[in-house]
């Protein structure tokens, strides 16, 4: 996922009052490992960082 696309999705979801949603085709992800080179926590961090950069959502981190 490209960071600019993620930021746009986060900003749009904020504008719509809906949770961010992402979709991928089967040739973009491995059903067991997710996006190539990314673990689930990496995807979470990308979305949270996008939310912080756009200033649309308050992000509460627990760690």
Image (cartoon, helix red, strand yellow):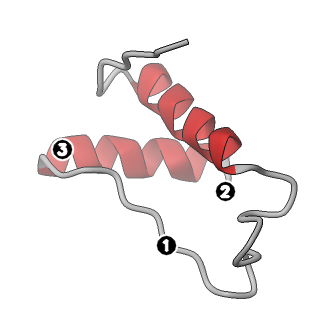
Which image quarter holds the N terminus? bottom right
Does 56 sit left or right of 35 as displayed?
A: left
- Disc 3 crowd, CA 10 A, few/some/many (<14, 14-19, 20+): few
> Mark 3 or 1, which is nearer the eye?
1
Where residue 13 sits: x, y (%)? 26, 49
Label pair 3/1, CB-CB below 8 angstroms: no
* Residue bearing mark 2: 1
Sequence-wise, which precedes: disc 3 or disc 1?
Answer: 3
> Mark 3 or 2, which is nearer the eye?
2
Q: Quadrant of residue 10?
A: top left
| Vertical arrangement, residue 38 with respect to residue 33, above or below | above
Where residue 25 sits: x, y (%)? 62, 85
- Disc 2 crowd, CA 10 A, few/some/many (<14, 14-19, 20+): some
The Cα–Cα distance between marks 2 and 1, rounded to whole angstroms, is 10 Å
Does 57 sit left or right of 32 as displayed?
A: left
- Disc 1 crowd, CA 10 A, few/some/many (<14, 14-19, 20+): few
Is disc 3 placed on a helix, strand or loop? helix
Q: Which of the pair 29/16 is nearer the observer?
A: 29
Which image quarter holds the C terminus? top right
Mark seen at residue 23: 1
| Vertical arrangement, residue 34 with respect to residue 61, above or below | below
Does 9 sit left or right of 3 as displayed?
A: left
Q: Residue at x 45, y 21 (%)?
A: 52
Q: Residue at x 87, y 54 (%)?
A: 37
Is disc 2 placed on a helix, strand or loop? loop
The mark tally for this picture is 3
The Cα–Cα distance between marks 3 and 2, rounded to whole angstroms, is 21 Å
Q: Which of the pair 8/19 is nearer the observer?
A: 19
Where residue 36 sits: x, y (%)? 84, 63
* Residue bearing mark 3: 15
């Amino acid at each position: 996922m490209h960071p600019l696309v993620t930021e746009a999705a986060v900003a749009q979801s904020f504008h719509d009052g809906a949770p961010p949603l992402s979709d991928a085709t089967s040739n973009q992800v491995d059903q067991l490992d997710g996006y190539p080179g990314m673990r689930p926590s990496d995807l979470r961090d990308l979305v949270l960082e996008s939310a912080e950069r756009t200033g649309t959502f308050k992000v509460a981190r627990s760690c």
